Image (cartoon, grey):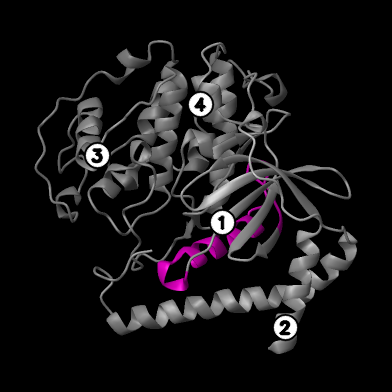
Amino acid sequence: MASKAILGEEINKETESLYKKEKKLGEGTYAVVYLGHHIKTNRKVAIKKIKLGNMRSGLDMSAIREVKALRELRHPNVIELIDVFSHKTSLNLVLEFLDTDLEIVIKDKSLVFMPADIKSWMMMALRGLDHCHKCWLLHRDLKPNNFLIAANGQLKLADFGLAREFGDVKRAMTSQTVTRWYRAPELLLGATNYTGSIDIWAMGCIFAELSLRAPYLPGASDLEQLTTIFRARGTPSEDEWPGMMKLPMGYSFEKFPKPQFSDLFRGSSEEAVDLMNKMLTFNPTNRISAADALKHPYFANLPRPTAPEKLPRPLKSLAGGEEGEGGGDEVVSVDDDVVASKKRLFQDAFDDGLEAERQKMGEQAAKRMDFSISSPA
C-alpha cells in the first residue's frame, strides 16, 4: 500500500508539471475553471479545479464519478478528459478547451438562427446524450451552458458532476437534481426511480429555448415550476400519466387546459413541433428516447443540418472572461511517455478505490432493505 501511495504521489506531481494555468474562466459553488496550456505542445486546455470536502459531504465521490464517467465516454459530442491531478485539497480535471457554449449563442441577439442551425445543434446534442444513455449513464444537469462549442463548431456535452449510472429500478436516486427550468415533472413531484427520460425532458426544454431564444419554462420555485409546466403544457390527468398521483408530493394542482403548442412555435416546422412534443411528454415511459429522437423525420427532412463549421458563432468567447489567478509556482515539464507509463500502473488503484466505495454503499443499502426511504444519491 505504501509503495502504491508513493507511486501515486510521484505520478500526480509529474502530471501537474505538464500543465500551466493562465487565467480564471468561471467559478461555481464547487469548482473553478481556468484556461491553461500543455507546456510541451502549447495546446490550450481547460483546468477544472474541484474543491474537495470530506467523504461525508459526498463531494469527493461526485468528483470520482465525474472522472470515471469522462474516462469511459469517448465520443465526438462529449468533452474529452485529458488528464487528472490533485493539488492540496483540490482535484484538477484537465479538459479539452472549448471556447463558447450554447447559452452564450442563444443570448447573443446579434446572431440570426436558421432552422437548419437549430437542427444541427440538436443533432449533435442528441448524439452525445444517446452515447451517454447507451453507456447507462444519466447526465442529470442538461442545460444550454453545459453544451460547449469547439472552434470548429462541434457541440459537446460537458459537466458530469451530477452524472449517475442507472438501470437498477430498485436503486433510489435524489429528485433534487437538474437545474429547475430543465427539471422533469416527475422529479419535481419527488420521484426517486427514473431513467434517461429526465434528460430527454431537459433536451425538449433546450430545443424550445433554441426556437424561442428565451427559456421555455422558467419557474422561481419548485412549486411555481410545476405550475409553469402545467400552464404551458396543460395539467395532466391520471389517464395521461398513470402513477402520477402515487408520486411522493401527491397531486392537487389547478386544472389548466392544454394549449395549442404549435401557436408558440410558429417559426418551427411541423416535424420540429412534433419532436418537441414527444420530448416533453408527461408520462416518462412514453417520452421519446435519444436514439429514437435521432431517427425522427425532423432530422431526415429538409433543410439539412448546417455543417458545424458554418454555424453562427458569437464574437465573445469563454476565453475572453475576467482575468483570474495564475497557476502558482513555475513548474518543470517532464516527458509525457514517462507519466503515461506510470499512470497505467496506478490505474488499478483508482478503480479498486471506486469499487470499494461502491461495495460499501451497497452493504449500507442492503442493511436498510427499504429502497423507498434509502439515502438518495
Q: Marks 2/3: CA distance?
A: 48 Å
Q: Mark 3 or mark 4: which comes first in sequence?
A: 3
Q: Earlier in the sequence, mark 3 or mark 1?
A: 1
Secondary structure under tag 1 reads strand
Q: Which mark is residue 221?
A: 3
The dot on residue 347 is none
For residue 4, the mark is 2
Q: Which residues are magenta?
A: 54-83
User: Picture quarter containing residue 70?
Assistant: bottom right
Mark nearer the viewer, 1 or 2? 1
Q: Is residue 300 magenta?
A: no
Q: Residue at x 82, y 72 (%)?
A: 342
Q: Which residue is mark 4?
A: 297
Q: Nearer the viewer, residue 336 or 87?
A: 87
- Tell me the distance, in whole angstroms, between the alpha carbons under discs 4 and 2: 54 Å
Nearer the camera: disc 1 or disc 4: 1
The quarter of the picture where the C terminus appears is bottom left
Measured as percent of width and height from the top left, residue 159 is found at 55, 47
